[in-house]
Image (cartoon, rainbow, N blue to C red):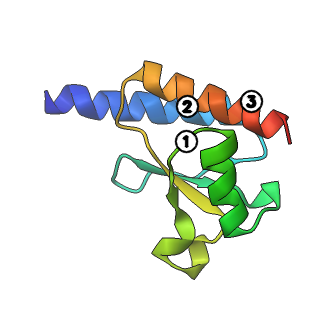
Amino acid sequence: WLDKVKKQIVDNDQYLRELFKEKLPEIVVTPLEGTYLVWLDCRELGMSNEELSRFMVEKAGLGLSDGYTFGRSLSGYMRLNAACPRSVLKQALEQLRAAVEAL
């Protein structure tokens, strides 16, 4: 089961990278650092940390972790869990894409 989960995380990471590059170039996916939590660099959206957090919840319908709570250097970042079924990830990314396009 562990090998299956690791493969799913790697596959989801690759899927995220391709999708963001193609459909959400405003948000940069940082490389995984030995975990299933992906940092999204949202600074190009031009929002304060509070605005970004509200945007993710109210407009995209996503409960991501605020980067700034992990340190000042992560201001403008959000953290996404990539260890989930692909269908959940697809839905979340579609919601985020629609919200960003509506800006």
Q: Residues within 10 Å of mark 3 (few under 14, many from 20)?
A: few
Q: Quadrant of the C terminus?
A: top right
Q: Position of residue 24 (x, y in %)?
A: 74, 36
Q: In the rendering, at what x and y percent does residue 96 appear?
A: 66, 36
Q: Amino acid at mark 2?
A: Ala
Query: Mark 1 is on which residue type?
Result: Leu
Query: Do labels 2 and 1 touch, CB within 8 Å?
Result: yes
Question: For this rendering, which residue is in front, 54 or 27?
Answer: 54
> Which disc is residue 98 wearing?
3
Task: Please state which of the two labelled residues, at mark 2 or mark 1, is closer to the viewer.
Answer: 1
Q: CA distance from mark 3 to mark 1?
A: 12 Å
Outermost residue to the left:
1
Is residue 103 shown left or right of residue 7? right
Q: Earlier in the sequence, mark 2 or mark 1?
A: 1
Q: Is residue 1 above or below residue 62?
A: above
Q: Position of residue 30 (x, y in %)?
A: 57, 53
Mark 2 highlights which residue? 92
92 vs 22, left or right, is left
Find the distance from the CA under tag 2 to the CA under tag 1.
7 Å
Q: Residues within 10 Å of mark 2 (few under 14, many from 20)?
A: some
**Residue pointed to by mark 1:** 62
Residue at the spot 67% in from the left edge and 67% down from the top edge: 50
